[in-house]
Image (cartoon, grey):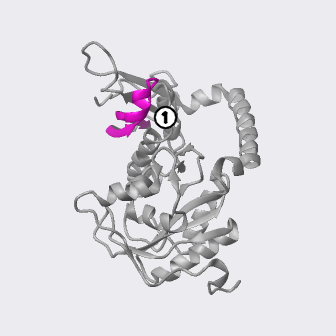
Amino acid sequence: MTGQPAGGPPGRDRSGGGVHHDRITLAGLRVHGRHGVLPAERELGQFFVIDATLWLDTGPAAATDDLSLTVHYGELAEALAGIVAGEPVDLLETLAHRLVQACLAQPLVSAAEVTVHKPAAPISVPFADVAVTVARSRHDQELHGQESQDRELRDRELHAQEGRHIQEHTHGHAVVAIGSNIGDRLGFLRGAVRELDARLGVLAVSPVYETDPVGGPEQDDYLNAVVLVAAAPPGELLAAARAAEQAAARERTVRWGPRTLDVDIIACGDLRSDDPDILLPHPRAQDRLFVCVPWLDVDPGATLVGHGRVADLVAALSAVPGAVAPRRTSHGLLTPHDLPGPER
């Protein structure tokens, strides 16, 4: 089920017409999702397999050996997986369109093709596979410029409505996880709280836990905490998170590698976002004790949309053989107004 495309890129004739013929293919990405029209599909979910091909000019990256001049396929895989594991849809066509748009969001990509396989589809007769393939190019988008402008106007109105009604949908707060395992770990966490308070308003801060690193290369243990901040639209939450990381000189050089500061938006009430830059709720929050345990400290009745009570998640994760519980430290994070800093 590699779904390798034939011929040239989508959106132009096979003579090229300005679209690059270099391509990067990500095949066989297997992700659990809950897409489909049947209640059982939404409740139990199933695995989907994704193939994605991106057309771009790889010459500049080849000449300079510079990752920033091509597509980081590891980050792309994580973005696509987040969409599949995120908000359920009825149709494979809808899912495939969301995935191809995420591919075209890569600034260097001129065209993309995505195939969504549903090998466990509820079909009553024997079959090998069912799949939907969607191909789009920037040229397609140019041909539908007016439609895009209309859609942008509708999106602006939706964002305005989101801003007006954010309290109704988010119960007044968002959940932010912070972590550090380089240098002055506690200092970086305190700096994150100050930055989040300045931009969003901090409502509560959990105790600090020390946790073993999950995934990535061998590295030191993390200090982790959870912060509740005032509810805000996803774009504002993301901007605050990135600002806090930038203030701590966060560098993204090694995937899942050590870091001065990691700031993840976990949830904002029952708000959902399938934007690849900020998936809500966080697609892996339900699997992370170092998120769920401190979250319970500041909100004992917390629920994670789509997954239920956080207390139940902690119980289930703790019962897994070999599970390592986060270790509560004696450090503690002070409330924002008690934290040392030039503005306090």
Residue at screen point 38% across, 71% down:
258
Q: Is residue 140 left or right of residue 327?
A: right
Under tag 1, what secondary structure?
loop
- Residue 270 visible in the picture: yes
Determine which quarter of the picture holds residue 128. top left
- Residue 25 visible in the picture: no
The percent coordinates of residue 187 (x first, y second) are 52, 82
Q: Check the image and report above or below for 25 versus 268.
A: above
Residue at screen point 39% across, 48% down:
73
Type of the residue with mark 1: Pro
Question: Which is nearer the eye, 238 or 166?
Answer: 166
The percent coordinates of residue 20 (x first, y second) are 46, 35
**Image quadrant occupied by the C terminus:** bottom right
The percent coordinates of residue 33 (x first, y second) are 40, 37
Q: Which residue is mark 1?
A: 88
Question: Which is nearer the eye, 261 or 52?
Answer: 261
Q: Check the image and report above or below for 191 versus 234.
A: below
Residue at screen point 48% across, 64% down:
296
What range is drawn magenta here? Answer: 28-54
Q: How many marks?
A: 1
Q: Check the image and report above or below for 2 versus 212.
A: above
The percent coordinates of residue 250 (x first, y second) are 50, 70
Residue at screen point 54% across, 67% down:
298
**Image quadrant occupied by the N terminus:** top left
Magenta region includes residue 52: yes
Magenta region includes residue 185: no
**Other residues around mark 1 within 10 Å, as few (<14) / some (14–19) / many (≥20):** many
